[in-house]
Amino acid sequence: MSAASASASASASDSATPTATHDVSSGLLIRKPVADVFEAVVNPSITTRFWFSDSTGRLEEGKVVKWTWGWFGFSMPIVCIQLETNKRVVHSWGTPSGAKVEAEWSFEPVESIGTFVRVRVAGLRASDLTPASISVLTSDVQDQTQGFALVLAGMKAWLEHGVQLNLVEDHALPRK
């Protein structure tokens, strides 16, 4: 259903403290035209059917919006870095540790079938190579991979069948 992958590299920073970084990617064929799939990512009236519960606006290059996951009592600012209509969307957000994470969406038309959409997330980092830091990074990689696989599956169900599966909302126990 969804292809997910992770790649790792260790590097030395200016302070000579080794760090670890990961990029993750998920992709899925959606049997709808590129324009429909692209619109589902940038238009919150569609995106709220499969990802977050509220947004302060449409994704537009250079614009900051706030996405809210009301069922989790959580929101965050999202910066739309690049937007190429029907081809690519790049947006970023900050993490509690202060790191900037970027998601790049690409939309590839598949003749007579639909659109292959891929999300690549970059910027997941461990501040050092201690077991605790690597454990946090591993958890982040798992969360991003699972999260975007759920988002893509929810988008597919909504766009192809008009079914709202609530995958993001239901992947964790409700808040008390």
Image (cartoon, rainbow, N blue to C red):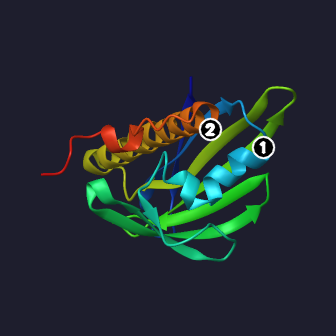
Task: Name the amino acid, label 2.
Answer: Leu
- Find the residue positioned furthest to the left: 176
The answer to which quarter of the image holds residue 44 is bottom right
Q: Secondary structure at mark 2?
A: helix
What x and y, as percent, mark residue 74? 31, 62
Q: Residues within 10 Å of mark 1 (few under 14, many from 20)?
A: many
Instruction: Name above or below for residue 48 compared with residue 97.
Output: above
- 7 or 80, which is in the foreground? 80
What x and y, as percent, mark residue 101? 51, 60
The answer to which quarter of the image holds residue 111 is top right
Q: Nearer the viewer, mark 1 or mark 2?
A: 2
From the image, tell me which residue sits under label 1. 34
Mark linked to residue 159: 2
Q: Residues within 10 Å of mark 2 (few under 14, many from 20)?
A: some
Instruction: Name above or below for residue 24 compared with residue 112.
Output: below
- 159 or 9, which is in the foreground? 159
- 5 or 154, which is in the foreground? 154
Left or right, residue 19 beside residue 27: left
Determine whether label 1 and label 2 are within 8 Å by CB: no
- Find the residue positioned furthest to the bottom: 63
